């Protein structure tokens, strides 16, 4: 389990960044970030990640024992965003990269990549073989990040997906 990690943000000085598993005290601010950023990109309502019930209390839905973890990035003590991993397939081979959302001022800083890499490292320790994600075509920076990490686009979503509002589906081989 990742307790905490220090990260250096690109093009930032005098900044302290901490990445650690979500706590119940962070639930409200993480919910606000996910819903606000989701609305910015049109991901509102059923069929989109920000509309999932878990968003109201992320700390209750993610546990290492359940093969999941949601990480929160704080910059100078303020929550900047987060990202998680959770089981996706019934057979336990595929996980899902979930809810990578950052406040606008932290996008392009390297924070999203750091969160994603730590989530993927966790996924590997849990024995997952592949990692799935879905997103929106308007989230171009996120898609470029995912592609740079080796995710490849799928022609259609897997049957298991509940986010039918998304129009980009990607998969990464973790082996």
Image: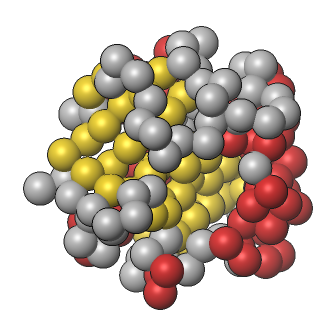
Q: In this view, does 34 lie above or below 43?
A: below
Q: Which of 9 and 151 is in front in this view?
A: 151
Quarter of the image with the C terminus in it: bottom left
Asked whether, in this view, residue 68 is left or right of residue 78, the answer is left
Q: Which residue lies furthest to the left in this view?
A: 175
Residue drawn 40% across the image and 22% down it: 156
- Residue 66 appearing in the image: yes
Q: Quadrant of residue 24?
A: bottom right
Q: Which of 155 and 127 is in front in this view?
A: 155
Q: Residue furthest bottom?
A: 65
Residue drawn 53% across the image and 42% down it: 161
> Residue 168 in the image: x percent, y percent?
47, 21
Q: In this view, does 12 lie above or below 118?
A: above
Residue drawn 61% across the image and 53% down it: 82
Residue drawn 75% across the image and 27% down it: 43
Q: In which quarter of the image is residue 1?
A: bottom left
The image's colouring method is: secondary structure
Q: Nearer the viewer, residue 47 or 173?
A: 47
Q: In this view, does 123 lie above or below 1?
A: above
Numbered circles on residues, count? 0
> Residue 71 in the image: x percent, y percent?
56, 63
- Residue 16 appearing in the image: no
> Residue 120 in the image: x percent, y percent?
33, 56
Asked whether, in this view, residue 141 is left or right of residue 32, the answer is left
Asked whether, in this view, residue 27 is left or right of residue 121, the answer is right
Q: Is residue 27 above or below residue 98?
A: below
> Residue 8 in the image: x percent, y percent?
43, 50
Q: In which quarter of the image is residue 26?
A: bottom right
């Amino acid at each position: 389990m990742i307790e905490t990690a220090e990260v250096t943000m690109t093009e930032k000085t005098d900044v302290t960044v901490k990445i650690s598993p979500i706590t119940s005290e962070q639930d409200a601010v993480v919910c606000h970030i996910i819903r606000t950023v989701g609305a910015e990109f049109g991901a509102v309502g059923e069929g989109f990640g920000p509309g999932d019930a878990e968003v109201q209390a992320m700390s209750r839905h993610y546990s290492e024992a359940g093969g999941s973890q949601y990480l929160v990035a704080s910059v100078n003590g303020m929550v900047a965003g987060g990202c998680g991993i959770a089981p996706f397939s019934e057979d336990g081979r595929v996980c899902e990269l979930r809810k990578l959302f950052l406040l606008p001022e932290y996008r392009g800083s390297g924070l999203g990549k750091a969160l994603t890499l730590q989530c993927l490292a966790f996924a590997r320790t849990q024995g997952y073989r592949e990692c799935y994600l879905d997103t929106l075509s308007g989230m171009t920076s996120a898609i470029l990040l995912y592609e740079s990490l080796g995710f490849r686009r799928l022609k259609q979503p897997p049957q298991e997906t509940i986010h039918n509002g998304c129009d980009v589906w990607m998969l990464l081989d973790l082996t």
